[in-house]
Amino acid sequence: MAEPLFLKPVFHEKIWGGRRLATDFNYDLPAGTIGECWAISGHPHGPNEIENGEFKGQLLPDVYAKHPEVFGNPKSPVIPLLTKILDAEASLSVQVHPDNAYAEKHEHELGKTECWYIIHADAGAYLTYGHTAKTREELKEMIENHEWGKLFGKKPVKTGDFVYVPSGTIHALNKGIMALETQQSSDTTYRIYDYDRVDKKTGKKRALHLKQSIDVTTVPFKEPQLNSTVEKVGDSVVTTLITQPDSPFFSVYKWEVNGHLTRQHEHGPYTLMSIIDGQGTLTVDGKEYELKKGTHLIIPATVKEWSMDGKMLVIASESVE
């Protein structure tokens, strides 16, 4: 099978979500405040259905389990990456994620290292990112005393920025930001602070996870320094946003397609692709497929080379095994 796998997104309502995924990406959203589009997912909380070809109508994790050759006979028993688009109409909770060892022991799933490509940021938008505590005791004390202004770090962001969030990093997307998130396939989040807001559906505040947060936060915080590279390929631009050794779990690329661009798998056996803007065509094994803003797909291991034509902004990723 030498064809791409196009995926049907799964949408999740969130207390902090909105409707921009409909207006900006033309998605047919369910009712409510939709905060997350699970775009490429094998996770049980939101697996994608394949929309084309031999596996049309099947769920992505089932194909991964039954047809490992499509994914290069991977070692991981689950699809290790998850791609989302997040719409922060309001600020997300301030949170932290565990690493693999802690998550496997306490949550029976992968840890969660992630990164964000900022699709849109309102003027003055910022992330909550990092913290000021020098020791775990100081972290515990500041959390218990609710010294949020003193504890949490702030990072201004603008459209087009890229931010790496290793497990153990205190963080939050704040109001007015839309981001494409590449992450380990995990749904474990430990909330530290949630603005004392009440969930209208339950009439209650959402649970906090202070003990776990103190356990897993990296102390002291040190912002990762990334070594991105930019390459001109004809009239197109290929940016490697992150790869090894900066990230042990994934490589992420930005492809600014302007005319024609040919690619191959670089650091993993298969490639995940999300069209963030523009439109064009994908050619695989002599067959053309339409690409437009909001399309998500996987180029399987059975495809060695593919080309894109048009004008598009693509965020692509590969699992590092």
Image (spheres, helix red, strand yellow):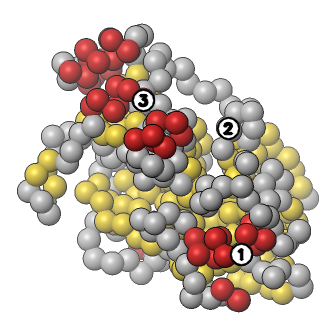
Q: Which residue is found at the position 78% from the left and 71% from the top? A: 69
Label 2: how many Cα within 10 Å (few below 14, some 14–19, many 20+) = some
Residue 255, placed above or below residue 262: above
Residue 137, placed above or below residue 311: above
Secondary structure under tag 1 reads loop
- Which residue is identified by label 3? 216
Q: Which residue is found at the position 80% from the left and 59% from the top? A: 269
- Left or right, residue 125 beside residue 110: left
Q: Earlier in the sequence, mark 1 or mark 3?
A: 1
Q: Amino acid at mark 2?
A: Ser
Task: Say whether marks 3 and 2 touch (CB < 8 Å).
Answer: no
The N terminus lies in quadrant: bottom right
Q: Which residue is found at the position 38% from the left and 15% from the top? A: 136
Task: Say whether marks 1 and 3 touch (CB < 8 Å).
Answer: no
Q: Quadrant of residue 192?
A: top left
Q: Amino acid at mark 3?
A: Val
- Which residue is identified by label 1? 67
Q: Earlier in the sequence, mark 2 or mark 1?
A: 1
